[in-house]
Amino acid sequence: MSADAHPRLADQLKGGLGAPICLTWELTYGCNLSCIHCLSSSGRRDPRELSTAEAMAVFDELHDLQVFYVNIGGGEPTIRADFYELVDYSVSRGVGVKFSTNGTTISPERARRLAGSDHVDVQVSLDGADAATNDAVRGAGSYAAARRAMDHLAAAGFGAFKISVVFTRANAGQLDELEALAAGYGAELRLTRLRPSGRGARSWAALHPTRDQQIALYHWLRDRPAVLTGDSFFHLSALGESLPGLNLCGAGRVVCLVDPVGDVYACPFVVHPRFRAGSVRDPGGFTRIWRRSGLFVELRQPSSAGACAVCGSYDACQGGCMAAKFFTGLPLDGPDPECVEGHGEAMLASLPAGPVPSPGAGHSAPVSFGGRRR
Amino acid sequence: MRGLLIDFDPQARYRLDGRVALRPEPFGALAYHYGDRRLTFLRSALLAEVVRDLGSHPSVDAALEAVVPEAQRPAYRHALEALARSGLIREC
Ligand code: SF4
Ligand code: SF4
């Protein structure tokens, strides 16, 4: 479409939309794994998690808002006994589903049933091209489990499922292998950014990619526009030509999170009281929050470039990721901690000693296989 | 790839693909294709209207004549051609 006569799309989107484009809904905090970078600090289920009926009422709202699809995650969403009932309900209401799973529960039979549905997309998490790299982050046996799920999906003729990889210092050298792995399955590779959110707050310093790795990633992605990124890496656009995507922080504008207990946050990576906009259980439900919550209205105001104003790359980079700044203690109008110009590191080094906002322990639980945990 | 061989014929009747949902937005509309899960930005309210009502006109040109000022029709025809190539609208 001829877009030239219009204001920049990104600028228009900053003012917010009638409904989110990228709505993540974490259905449970329960998980059989306990990845060291889990953005939602999942482990134990929460007794206050939304009931089946409450969840269906939210799907009804999403239908009325004309939300096209939801990204369902967790925890491990498939451990909810009503998971597939909710997926079917969502699809019946015209809301497509893309769900993330660690793969453990994707049996051959389940894979066949998934392959039969047009409106359901599956994303299997994998954080390394081999078991050693992956399992160091996601836990023993998790690589084999994810590969089994992929085998089953491919055998069932699911088509192009997604392999979702968090880009880290440890797997940065494996991009070509991961690409080949995805190609072998007829799957799509999706790379996302590690943020210091949830348990990632503690593992970030050791796991986040180095500057050289980020630069290599930028060029690798520039050469491969088909690799999905969920717009994760727009801070790298400061290196030159923009990466494909909207290139803006969508929090509260095009992005939001519904957590397992129904709390709504500006983005899945900012589960913290500062970015909690309300609960779907409040009067007016999700719709009222999306349209009128004070937080979302605030996030849709034009933001100032702050400390980035002096940088010639601000238009491309927009100062990076709000979550990454917040949980490393940087000002929200400052540079991203992984600023490619090095300003983030410099500012981190000069921060006065003091507490940094903490995501807390969340629902983390000691790993207990064969225990009572469900 | 899809699209390369599609001839766009403004004299023919087109309609929104059945797997596409349109949602009005302040800048125009968002279109989502449930088949290939692609999102498209329709960046004017008028374009969104034309796309929505395309199927009720005997041809693309008739749909444009109905609501688009003459001077803008070439640009709109061009936009619709792009939408046809991406599978958002199709001949019927
Ligand atoms: S100074 Fe700010 S705008 Fe410039 S590259 Fe760094 S984070 Fe981006
Ligand atoms: S806070 Fe970070 S992860 Fe969340 S929408 Fe903004 S840029 Fe994306």
Image (cartoon, coloured by chain):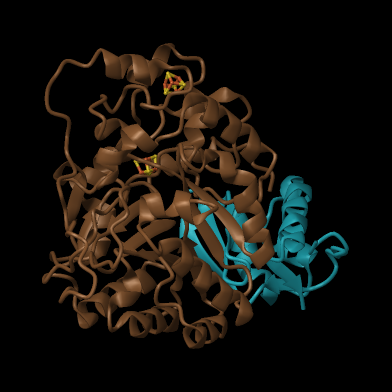
Chain colours: A brown, B cyan
Front position in the image: A268 or A348: A348
Q: In the rendered view, does A247 fall on the left or right side of A355?
A: right
Tell me residue A292's x, y (percent): 23, 52
Residue situated in front as seen by the camera: A187 or A371: A371
User: How many marks overall?
Assistant: 0
Quadrant (top left/top right/bottom left/bottom right) for the C terminus of chain A: bottom left
Image position of A95 with respect to A135: above or below: below
Q: Is residue A72 left or right of residue A181?
A: left
Instruction: Point out residue A332 in the picture as x, y percentages from the top left corner.
Output: 28, 28
**Which residue occupies 40% across, 44% down?**
A250
In the rendering, at what x and y percent does residue A202 appear?
25, 39
Residue A93, located in which quarter of the rendered image? bottom left
Front one among A304 and A174: A174
Residue drawn at (19%, 73%) of the image: A50
The residue located at (63%, 58%) in the rendering is A181
Q: Quadrant of residue A358?
A: top left
In this rendering, does residue A301 appear at all? no
Depth check: give the residue in front, A159 or B92.
Answer: A159
Q: Is residue A327 visible?
A: yes
Where does the image place residue A30, in percent across and percent down from the top left? 23, 68
Q: Is residue B28 above or below residue B92?
A: above
Q: Is residue A344 above or below residue A231?
A: above
Q: In the figure, is residue A335 to the left or right of A367? A: right
Identified at 29% across, 43% down, the residue is A200
Locate residue A68 relative to residue A362 in the image: left or right: right
Residue A222 vertical placement versus B25 (above, below): above
Point out the quarter of the image occupied by ligand 1: top left
